[in-house]
Amino acid sequence: MSHSSPAVERVAQFEVTYTQYLDPEGQPRAPLPDFAQDAEELRRMYRAMVQTRAFDKKAVVLQRTGRMGTYAACLGQEAIGTAIGCALRAEDIFIPAYREYAAQLLRGVRMRDILLNWGGDERGMHYEGCAIRHDFPLSVPIGSHVPQAIGVAYALKLRREPRVVLASCGDGATSKGDVYEAISSAKVWNLPLVFLISNNQWAISLPRGRQTGAQTLAQKAFAGGLPGEQVDGNDVIATRAVLAAAIERARSGGGPSLIEAITYRLHDHTTADDARRYRNEAEVQEAWQRCPVKRLKQHLEARGLLSASDEAALQQEASAFADQAAEEFLATPPASPAAMFDHLYAQLPKQYEWQRQEALARGLKPGH
Ligand SMILES: [Mg+2]
């Protein structure tokens, strides 16, 4: 029997790109997109990042002083939320995980409501008084909200509405079946959908390298037939530009995309976590060099768009903004203790009915 080579030919090949406009010192690496030529627009983005950071810090203080149950800080990830908030139109639908508070701030959510939610009061996710009430609530379970984006995007397509769904999740969620299933369906139906993965390098205590053997998370798109790419998630200009392109492609019938935004979680996973137990402090210090707020600040300063007095005024405003959110949260009367029973069933089963009555009779307060 003679040895022969089988006929092997390449049937597909894929490439993952990584986009960055600003280096960690805020220096442009390429000509900037149009929105970044606009000084007012850049200042608006910077303001959102500064306000988000101040809010985040205040929220951690509220938890540490026993006035809020738990909180997932977005420290170091402010650029991603800001990019989402700027790239989406009001009529688009945002299906968040958590940590994208800057997007919610820019979409008009009252920050008091974010605090209410983390305080265990689901009225916070009603988005009352917010023009954009069609966004989804924060999703704490990992990845289970991503398939819901398929249903929402499918509805928009059926109704022929030129709106886009953006579903965000973390690096850990990309190992969940829910996310794979959503990726698998999105292109088959050519949905107006963008998946955004905030790869902050840690899924609670599990480092990115142990989350998956895949070289990138962006490449998970390819199995579903979607374009997948990486962007520097600490570069707000790059993240907004890449997101805007994917969103407008989806809006014009070009179908879904997946974007992996590379960032770093500078805080603990939540206030219920202590990252010092599993993570090297040198790694965290090194990540601070890539801080997204510092990067845009240095860029604005280099262009003469942010003076020392502008910065001082912004910081003062942000601090007052965070204080105001906290005051509004603390001044909100507690929900009725019956509320925890009210949305579980169309008709409350008997075994819960007496518990509901007893909760009302005892006047239980949330958290007690
Ligand atoms: Mg993560």
Image (tube, rainbow, N blue to C red):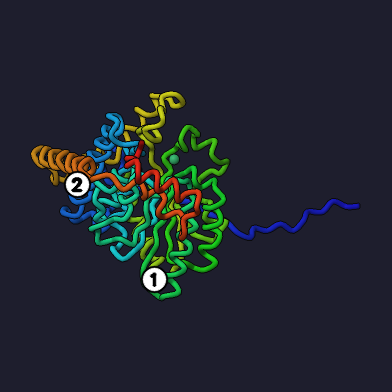
Q: Position of residue 104 (x, y in %)?
A: 29, 52
Residue shown at 37% from the left, 29% from the top: 284
Identify the element where label 2 is drawn: helix
* Neighbourhood count class around disc 1 (C-alpha, 10 Å): few under 14, some 14–19, many 20 upward: few
Residue 329 in sight = yes
- Tell me which label, 2 or 1, sits earlier in the chain: 2
The crowd level at tag 2 (other Cα within 10 Å; few <14, some 14-19, many 20+) is some
Residue at the left extreme of this rendering: 309
Front-most of residues 173 and 198: 173
| Left or right of 40, for residue 267 | right
Q: Which mark is residue 136?
A: none
Mark on residue 47? 2
**At 43% from the left edge and 43% from the top edge, which residue is drawn?**
199
Q: Residue 252: which disc? A: 1
Residue 329 spot, x, y in % from top left = 23, 43
The answer to whether residue 240 is seen in the rendering is no
Judged from the image, the quadrant occupied by ligand 1 is top left
Q: Secondary structure at mark 1?
A: loop
Q: Furthest residue to the right?
A: 1
Q: Amino acid at mark 1?
A: Ser
Q: For residue 294, what is the image quadrant?
A: top left
Q: Residue at x 41, y 28 (%)?
A: 275
**Of the pair 136 and 351, the residue shown nearer to us:** 351
x%, y% of residue 290? Answer: 32, 36
- Lateral position of residue 255 relative to residue 362, left or right: right
Q: Amino acid at mark 2?
A: Arg
- Numbered marks: total: 2
